Amino acid sequence: MSATGAHGLVEAEKDKSFKKIVQAFYCNLPDGMPLVWLGKAKGFPGMARCYGPDFFAAVLSQTAGMQHITHFFCGGKPGVAEKLQQQVGVRFNNFQIGGTYSPPFAPLQESDWESLTTSIEKAKASIIWIGLSTPKQERFAMELARRTCVHLIITVGAAFDFYTGSKPQAPRWMQQNGLEWFFRLCTEPRRLWRRYLEIVPKFVFYGTADLLKSLLKRKTA
């Protein structure tokens, strides 16, 4: 399962191999408001945003005390996943965290994958949460799915950083009006300006093209 935003859709249009990965997920949650607006314009009036960090919070809260459900956190800079483990105990009263893992910046070697899967098996994890950036987290999730046997693997982007206080979260009104990208750009301009300079116009272009195709299909149907 993946919480996918505009970044994911743009990457999928650029890279067909990544598009196959996104399409292979059991479920893709509309993580950003632009996706919701596009979906409604295409004829899905009941579509609503399913924000990755909110989904994470809801599941961790609702599974608190359920001894048969164990979570495993993968992602973030060194120390972030461990700090998140502490935070979910405080915030959600959920102490069923079987383990954590912070992937290195470089691609994982076979020995790294073997060590990670062994840790997941020992933890008897039910749900693996992956908090990385797109497209790394989706590729990581699909490779992990090939190597492990768990109930769910869910990608939630910056949720780890938000709940550990490593990065600020946009005010709710900005989220609801599709301005979260602008908030993040303002807080991390040096890291994100190139990304959003590409993503925003390309999403508008791809989204408009997709909408026009949908409208044409309706007329010819």
Image (cartoon, rainbow, N blue to C red):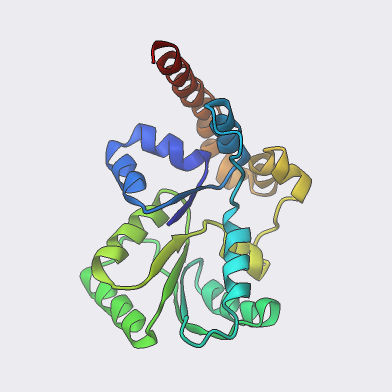
Q: How many marks?
A: 0
Residue at 59% in and 37% down = 36
Establish if 20 lies above or below 113.
above
Residue at 68% in and 39% down = 182
Residue at 37% in and 54% down = 26
Residue 177: x and y, percent? 72, 38
Quarter of the figure with residue 186: top right
Q: Residue furthest front?
A: 221
Residue at 30% in and 77% down = 117
Residue 220: x and y, percent? 39, 11
Q: Residue furthest left?
A: 110
Q: Quadrant of the N terminus?
A: bottom left
Quarter of the figure with residue 123: bottom left
Q: Is residue 58 left or right of residue 115?
A: right
Q: Quadrant of the C terminus?
A: top left
Establish if 169 lies above or below 14.
below
Residue 87: x and y, percent? 64, 78
Residue 115: x and y, percent? 29, 79
The one of 81 and 125 positioned closer to us in this rendering? 125
The one of 106 and 29 positioned closer to us in this rendering? 29
Is residue 215 shown to the viewer in this render? yes
The one of 214 and 167 positioned closer to us in this rendering? 214
Is residue 166 shown to the viewer in this render? no
